Image (cartoon, rainbow, N blue to C red):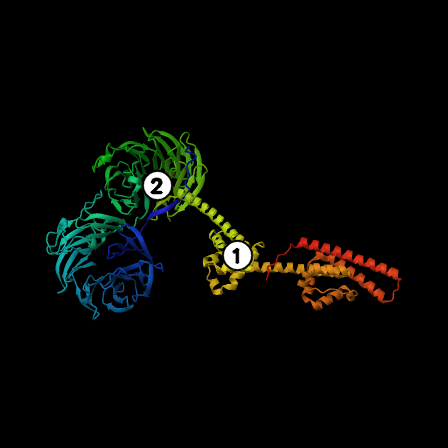
Amino acid sequence: MANSNLQFKTNYAVSSKIEPFYKGGKVQISKDEKYLFCTCGTRVNVLQIVTGKIVHSIEQDDQEDITSFALSYDDKILVTASKALLLKQWDWQQAQCTRSWRAIHNVPIASMTFDPTSTLLATGGCDGTIKLWDVLKQYCTHNLKGSAGVVHLVQFHPDISLLQLFSSSMDCGIRLWDLRSSQCVCILQSHYSAVTSLAFTPEGDTMVSSGRDKICTVWDLKTRTAKRTVPVYEAVESVVLLSENEDYSHIGVKTKELHFITAGSKGVLRVWEASSARCVFTQTLPVADSEGGEEEDGDPRSLTYCLPLPNSSSLATVTAEHNILLYQLPTLTTLQQFVGYNDEVLDVKFMGKGDSHIVVATNSSQIKVFELATSSCQILYGHTDTVLSLDVFKKGLLFASCAKDKSVRVWRMDSASGQVCCVAQGSSHANAVGSVTCSRMKETFVVSGSQDCTIKVWDLPEGIVDSGSDMHELTARLTEKAHDKDVNSVAVSPNDKLVASGSQDRTAKLWSLADMSLLGVFRGHRRGIWAVVFSPMDQVLATASADGTVKLWSLQDCSCLKTFEGHDASVLKIIFVCRGTQLLTSGSDGLVKLWTIKTNECVKTLDAHQDKVWGLHASRKDDKMVTASADSNITIWTDVTEIEIAEEQAKQEDQILKKQELSNLLHEKKYLKALGLAISLDQPHTVLKVIKAIQQGEDGHLQLEKTVLNLRQDQKESILRYCVVWNTNARSCQDAQAVIQVLLTHLPPEELLQYQGARTHLEGLIPYTERHMQRIGRLLQASMFLDYMWQKMRVTGAPASMDSQDEEMDSAPLQETQLLLITDKDHGKGVEEEEDDINEEDPDCSADMEVIRNGNDNNDDEVSICKKTSVNRGKAENGNENGEHHSSEESSGEEEDRDQGDQTTAKIAKFQMTTLLAESHPPLQTPSS
């Protein structure tokens, strides 16, 4: 096995994402040519052209799709229109809505544009009306009626002094509106299909219109007549005029006459001379191997927008597949290409020097190669049907692909330019090729598995890496009928001697690569197997199945070594990481799981996708991985294990230093800093210790009040949250109440209610506070009764010397409880009379006695002792008053015996009462009120 000292991976973090940002609709570029604006459902995404990153995403609150938007000429104001018939004005750099108002249109808005002064906004609705808005004064200035059907095009004349607006609707005419009179001046009739774009010369006297009727018309705006009709033989979506001051000889412009570029259904840019109606240049693109010769209308490569970037002498085009390309003029070389929408991603692999690129197979016949630094993309054409699987050779510059077109292709990346071209292809399968894998040691062969249940081994010609752009035809060296159902996955061992295959027939098989002889069959999965892979270190094969499990198999005897269960659905991909000691798996539940083989433990579950994760691959340095999902998202992950360990160590060191600092502050009695530091540690127990230390010092209450009030608001919020927890425990409730008293006394209720979670905290404090008050009340009642009984037993029949001594010892309890002393004249009273006297002078003490008598059965013995003593004393006094005569010696002896008995009985009663109350109630430390 691998080195036992190897550090296991514990976590991955998302480092970047390639996600859909454009799903069709309007595209606009800012005047400074730094940002590109495009719609994506309910959002308008702002793409930074240099980096290819989404810098802002402006989303509707009502979650309604955006039907149109417009950016002002000064790049300050963005206005969006949604299906909710609302217009919203945005500060797009802050992604904040500054104003919203209801459009007067009865149906959604189809088009909108700003005038050159950025003050007037024109909106064309599906109801055939055009409305103009003053965005500064915020009111509707014009309501233009007369168009037939949807107004899909509105555009101001570049000379704003003319106050003219051009529009086009379903009647195929171009209407010219005079904004001074709000009237349609004329209708320019030339097209027989929808007019798609208008382009004006800088002087504003000539206009070129394009339409889906495969013609472009040159108009003289002074006479409002058509000067020339140019047949372009394709449905044109956009037209751009070339500047007369630039040299465009590279694209066939030889004269200073008016020239324009068209973009349409054929997917190529073409340059036309307006005076002669000739096409002087046609762009050439890579041609896919297809049976059809010329591109047909509706091809996915057809162009929908063409936008000029005059400052940088470049051009931007948008394809029907939502790809955005930037071309450099006048050579029309590709500068950058952004993929707005990937559709379902089926496979992904790292490639290039230092894993600088990723190659992606989507639900289309094109292969996309992304540069991770800029998100710029190359689109590779060659396959004629959906590409299903990819694999990269060891050095990373050569990779193989297979598709539903029954073919296998090999591609090479130029290490200097980064350009990718196809260098070999083979097609002898009878059905779609679902899996492909490359040799591991040298670039010598490729193995493919197909839905025709066969496995083929393709040998690569020597020197294919340095063969230039020559295309080689591959032939299969070996073909083997491997399974009874589709072959979903094939893998080559690290020493290039074995091949493993996984099939929909629920088995995996091991083959010898030399002659494709069967070496073993792995049985145990309950459903089809989606992926097989060899361990890089051990003689182990891993399989992933649709039954939701991953199994490890021994290559020696084909026995199952381990089973990993954790996915709730099919496991689609599996790879070894960390020198074969851990596994990464992806499933149709959208989750990626990291497993430690030794312990069978799922270390981490990564959730970044909303659909099946078809693609999973690790970099050659084993420090990154990439996942691709059917939700059109591609996520690049970075191993953050070492970073987290370093952060944890630094955190522990910081905690130790802070605890030492806290101890020093408490020793120096710097309570404010100590309390703030304890709160920053987020340790409620430490904060409680600081508060206890403050209260135990001199003037503890005042010091606590001063310290708490000097805390910041966030620190007060934390200490209030801690008080809620402390208040639930009788040991710490007094400290909690002391802090709460300070806050409630010195802070207004309005400020307290602004604290985060203040209402919840206060609701949690009330029931426990009431419970503590009831407990303290019961203890106070019990202590009052003890003092009362002690006083009654002490003063009855006590000698004068002991009376004075006891008075000195127990003066404090007498003062606190304000009990009455019994004099000699009260000796004749019974217990009931004594209680009546107490009731008259001290009603609270009477209530306490009643509570104790009714509630404490344990005190019955003590009460009976007191009653017997009082009754005996009363009988003796009554007998003397009724005339019973005794001799003086007998009288004096009886009095001494009686005094001694009373004293002994009182001491016994006091001892028993004290012992009983001490057992039933612990000593109470009541807070000073």
**Amino acid type, residue under disc 1 in the picture:** Cys
Pick the front one: 325 or 275: 325
**Amino acid type, residue under disc 2 in the picture:** His
Q: Is residue 463 above or below residue 852?
A: above
Q: Quadrant of residue 408?
A: top left
Pick the front one: 440 or 458: 440
- Element type where label 2 sits in the image: strand
- Element type where label 1 sits in the image: helix
Label 1 Cα crowd, 10 Å radius (few <14 / some 14-19 / many 20+):
many
Q: Is residue 157 above or below residue 21?
A: below
Residue 599: horizontal and vertical position, in percent? 46, 38
Q: Is residue 62 above or below residue 510?
A: below
Going 63% across and 60% down the picture, which residue do you hit?
777
Q: Which residue position holds label 1?
A: 723
Does residue 712 appear in the picture of this structure? yes
Residue 625: horizontal and vertical position, in percent? 35, 42
Alpha carbons under labels 2 and 1: distance apart: 50 Å
Q: Which mark is residue 256?
A: none
Q: Which residue position holds label 2?
A: 617
Foreground mark, 2 or 1, reads 1
